[in-house]
Amino acid sequence: MRRAGRRSDALDDELAAWLAGADDDERAELTALAATDRTELARRFAEPLRFGTAGLRGPEEAGPAGMNRRTVARATAAVAAWLAAGPADARRGVVVGRDARRGSEAFADEAVAVLLGAGVPVLEWPEPGPTPLVPYAVRALGAAAGIMITASHNPPADNGYKLYDASGTQIVPPDDERVEALMRRGGAVPRAPRAAGPHRYLGPEVLAAYRARILRRFAPAGGSDLRIVYTPLHGVGGATFVGLLAEAGFRDVAVVAEQFAPDPAFPTVPFPNPEEPGALDRALALAGARGADLVLANDPDADRLAVAVPDAGRWRALRGDEVGWLLGWALLADASAPGAVVATSVVSSGLLAALAADAGIPCVTTLTGFKWIARAADPGELRFGYEEALGYAVDPAVRDKDGLSAGLALARLAEDLAREGRSLLDLLDDLEDRFGVHAGAQVARRDDAPGGRERLGAVVASLRAAPPDALGGIAVRAVVDLAAGAGGLPPTEGVVLELAGARVVVRPSGTEPKVKAYLEVVGEPGSRATLGTRRAAARERLGALEAAVAVLITPADPR
């Protein structure tokens, strides 16, 4: 009883300290919890948001574990203190952007006020916009850092905070650790209004410069009559991407009207993630009605790209790896300059490495997340980087994934192939003829109940301690513990199972209460005549592997 009492007293002390800087809404929410649900209150204070795979991200709720104005204020004050310590001259300013989620405008206002209160100049995007424009502006304007308020493709209740350094790349250790330590320091957070300066809104010339660069690289000569259907999934990419397609000369573009305007409720999709089942249903229905050649979709902050193509009378959504192979093949021809590198992550397909080796271009494998992929070429230049979760970097001007430029690059490739009487599927056939079938899948388990993250972490810990001898009838040849910093990579949570002609990577999600397994079965090269047979055999092996992995990563029942 004494121990419980001490913990309750400590929780009350933490609550009082937090409320000292909270606004009225947050004060009311936490005070009500203190009176009615101490268990939930304890969860809110058990572990503050931390910089994960893509920055701070979590449910919009009061307390240190949630995204709220106080969390944003603490993070931004920490950014100002971090800059003052010397990674870049804060007088160069910080770019601030936001998406159209609930709370994003208020959180951006908070970030701006805290930066100005610390005397740090602010370069602010005036309207909700795509995430890639923040890292682009950081580099283009020579800013000291960038902040983007977004939760990307997370559920509607979430929001987030991405932080870029002066290179336009998301921060990595030790900088994220330094910012987190400064967040914990607490203390008063001064604020200043925009009118107090130094503050300016970014003008249309910044977006125009981005468009001009991307169009120079990817607009097809003479335009295109490809019939394209596009959806931004209620996000902020719609106007910018449709404008890019029009300027590039794509003359037949139809949009999913009910998903075009930003809407933080995401009313037509179960999850605003183009990888999720059902997310592309409306786009595919419109494509079928119009007899389209290509479906393109961005996620809500437009840093990801999904692609679907007609295939023997039906629509086929391409896997993220398949789009990565296509873009990699197209861009390797432009990657021969000294210092040029391509990169992918440990959870993505191995085929890009084979393509790069054939072209004589270095290919680097990184940890999961574009904060690592974007740095893979340093001090050289990343000509192409991708991750299987629909993220692609196709131009060095943006050191993060960019669904806008990737979408235009993919449309250009489809047009180039069409002029030869070929399709994207024909090119995929060519690649798997030459380099072997690479069949892939992902298995995920989510646990939103209290204690879910701990149970999901236990799945990975159990796999590390007692890996299986075989999965799906395939022998496990080696086990690689990513927490040990395998292969020269920085340590991270995850386990790689190397099997005979296959691979399984299991890791906890960095942004959601999920554990994910990434599977790939690799076959031998062969002729076009045997491709169907080889693909069927690979799919059969993959199916058995999926079933086994689904059991392996299922967390314990919380009841």
Image: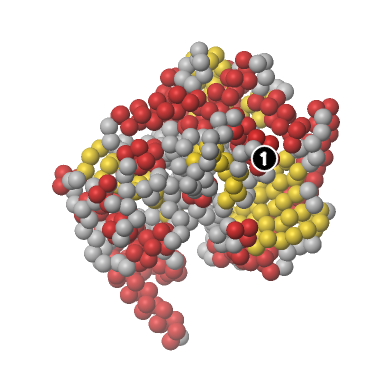
Q: Quadrant of residue 509?
A: bottom right
Residue hosting label 1: 357
Q: Position of residue 522 (x, y in %)?
A: 76, 43
Identify which amino acid the numbered label 1 is placed on. Ala
Asked if residue 277 shows in the view, the reply is no
> Among all residues in the image, which is located at the extreme bottom?
2
Q: Position of residue 43 (x, y in %)?
A: 45, 66
Q: Position of residue 371 (x, y in %)?
A: 48, 49
Task: Indicate the quadrant containing the N terminus: top left, top right, bottom left or bottom right.
Answer: bottom left
Residue shown at 25% from the left, 37% from the top: 201
Asked if residue 215 shows in the view, the reply is yes
> Among all residues in the image, which is located at the extreme front?
338
The answer to whether 227 is drawn above or below residue 387 in the figure is: above
Residue shown at 66% from the left, 54% from the top: 505
User: In the drawing, does residue 303 fall left or right of residue 356?
Assistant: left
Q: Position of residue 489 (x, y in %)?
A: 58, 57
